[in-house]
Image: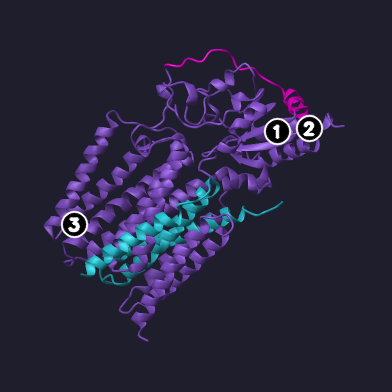
Chain colours: A purple, B cyan
Amino acid sequence: MSIELLIQASYLIVAALFILGLKAMASPVTAKKGIVWAGVGMVLATLITFATPKMGNFGWMIAALVSGGALAWYLGKVVKMTDMPQMVAIYNGMGGGAAAAIAALEFAKGGDHGVITTALAILGALIGSVAFSGSCIAFAKLQGIMKKAHRLPGQNGVNVVLGLGTIGLGAAIVVGGHPEPNHLIAFFVLSLALGVILTNPIGGADMPVVISLLNAFTGLAVGLEGYVLGNPALIIAGIVVGASGTLLTQLMAKAMNRPLTNVLFTPITGEAQEGGAITGTQKEASAMDAAAMMRFAQKVIIVPGYGMAVAGAQHKVWEMSKQLIDAGVEVKFAIHPVAGRMPGHMNVLLAEAGVPYDLIFDLEEINEEFRQADVALVIGANDVVNPSARSDKSSPIYGMPILNADHAQNVIVNKRGKGAGYSGIENALFYGENTRMLYGSAQQAIAEVIANIKTMQG
Amino acid sequence: MENFIYLYIFMLAAFTGYEVISRVPVILHTPLMSGSNFVHGVVLVGAMVALGNADPNEPLQLVIGFFAVFLGAANAAGGYVVTERMLAMFKSNK
């Protein structure tokens, strides 16, 4: 058997492993097997590629492979669960950057590739560069390096001009045949700038949707560069991810009731909140009040948000829940589709703390139950329980499905201070008649509640 | 003709991608995004081939190639670890 045949057969197996792995990852029962299959595929693909005939530069190759792989492996191991979303973003950006760099390298080698190949290489370079710089911005925002969403005056106009300029230059390179180095450099700079200005104005709860979209972009870029290199493993894996990533992006956007075009072009900002003035004051509750309200309730629904995760309070919250359950209180957890920073992120965090699945409910499953709940305990969540999303048409989050915590008999909101939330929007829930504010970091506040419940036992 | 075969691969791969995750529970959205992030880490293979065929006497080509393989390897390795850690949380502890 020739080595070429062996390589092609291996890539076929790799493609099958990737598809089966992704399929398995779409179901909770088989998800863990899925990532292992895909991992086996990746190792096979990497090893067999070393056997490709007429290759050189192995010193450089191994140095890059080991340093890049080891660094990312280490960082991925030590990062906290709460910081996972930005790690996904940055690794995705690196994939996009790699695809763009492949295109750059092919152009640097020169030679005539023909119109179709050049066009796909340019398109892949554009999409890959956007994914790279856009993901870096997304990482910086989630990591808290960049605090605010910046919107240029006439942002959409700037986007269109820059986008058309980049595409125009790319088309000129394709038609021109032998591209000038200066033109190529300008093209890459413009593409990277495009990723920055597209991602920069986006903030708040829209971030996961954007990361998912950039993930699909990287997949597409990888598929296109796979065509340039004539490598079917890249084409299949890239396009499969491009398509599934697009679908996933749509599912996420739908869960937030935010059409994708709104996410990209009319981002959520706090400034639009002028019309619906909020009246009333925030009423404070002590840890003892909160403990008593919950200890002697029939039913408590807990709404965890990113604030709880940041404070690392999920273990304390579960400890408190166990106390309440032992005292005969029915406790349930209500998870908003975008609780945490990404869909499903909060489920992962609660699972880590040991909360059993059968206490955790989705928005659709539990929203009607708030009416029967004596207490809704909101911990570090804000926009996802803001009733303005239901009623106030002037609110920037109008139309987003929310958890109806305000329908409970009593609402306890644990929050660090009086400020507005992640997206900077005021929350009418905090001023409600039946709402009591339990100020303090989640970790400390819940610890005090636990201590108080203990004194009320028996 | 060969170009057309590639077009067919593109099309079938796109349908496959759409089909594979058409029914996925919300709790798996993040792990699945992370998993597909890992899968496009196969760009590493393309980067290796591109670097392997670069002219060893051209420093610019070697640097770009090194960069490509470095980024691709980070995408693959990091994507795997992160996905694996997320999925490890899904233990049934009833």
Which image quadrant: the C terminus of chain A? top right
Instruction: Give the Cα distance between marks 2 and 3.
Output: 68 Å
B27 relative to A119 in the view: left or right: right
Tell me the chain of label 1: A
Q: Give the percent coordinates (x, y) of residue A309.
A: 60, 40
Residue located at (33% from left, 68% from top): A232
Q: Separation of disc 1 and disc 2 at Cα?
A: 9 Å
Q: Looking at the image, is B79 positioned above or below residue A229?
A: above
- Label 3 is found on which chain of the structure? A
Looking at the rendered image, the quarter that the N terminus of chain A falls into is: bottom left
Label 1 neighbour load within 10 Å: few <14, some 14-19, many 20+: many
Most foreground residue, A400 or A188? A400
Q: CA distance from mark 3 to mark 1?
A: 61 Å
**Disc 2 with disc 3 on a shared chain:** yes
Hey, which residue is sitting farthest right in the picture? Answer: A458
Query: Range of the magenta residues?
Result: A275-297
Disc 2 is placed on an element classified as: helix
Kind of residue at badge 3: Pro
Q: Nearer the viewer, mark 3 or mark 1?
A: 1
The amino acid at mark 2 is Ala
Reading the image, the residue beneath label 2 is A451
Rendered view: A27 above or below A251: below
Q: Residue at x 37, y 39 (%)?
A: A260
Give the structural element (helix, strand or loop) at label 1.
Answer: helix
Q: According to the image, label 3 marks what residue?
A: A181
